[in-house]
Amino acid sequence: MGDKNSAWYIVKGQSGQCEISTVDELETNDYTEKWGPFETQSDAIAKRVGLIRAGKCQPR
């Protein structure tokens, strides 16, 4: 896990699946959409669940 000062993001890949990423991982990921930053990983996870329920992301 990242340190306490990391910002967390949700990124949507070409497959339509959304993953949780840190700000450092954003540069290496190829994504089509991005949400965030979120203060904690659990905030990002909760938002990802909401995006899946809303049909904006595919579950894994």
Image: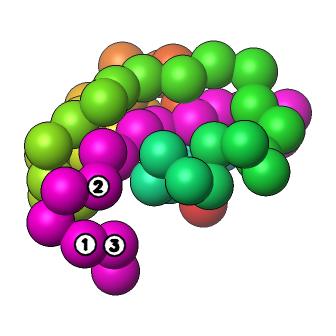
What amino acid is labelled 3 in the image? Answer: Gly
- Could you say which quadrant of the image residue 15 lies in? top right
Relative to residue 26, is residue 35 depicted above or below?
Answer: above
Q: Does residue 35 appear anywhere in the picture? A: yes
Q: Which residues are magenta?
A: 1-16
Contact between labelled residues 1 and 2, with CB atoms less than 8 Å apart: yes
Which circle marks residue 6 in the picture? 2
Residue located 33% across and 72% down the image: 2
The rendered magenta stretch, by its main secondary structure, is classed as loop
Q: Secondary structure at mark 3?
A: loop
Q: Secondary structure at mark 1?
A: loop
Question: Which residue corresponds to mark 1?
Answer: 3
Left or right: 45 as drawn, with respect to 42? right
Q: Secondary structure at mark 2?
A: loop
Question: Which residue corresponds to mark 3?
Answer: 2
Q: Does residue 58 appear anywhere in the picture? A: no
Q: Which of the two residues, 40 or 54, is positioned nearer the viewer here?
A: 40
Left or right: 3 as drawn, with respect to 31? left
Contact between labelled residues 2 and 3, with CB atoms less than 8 Å apart: yes
Q: Residue 47: x percent and y percent? A: 24, 35
User: Quick check: is 9 in the magenta stretch?
Assistant: yes
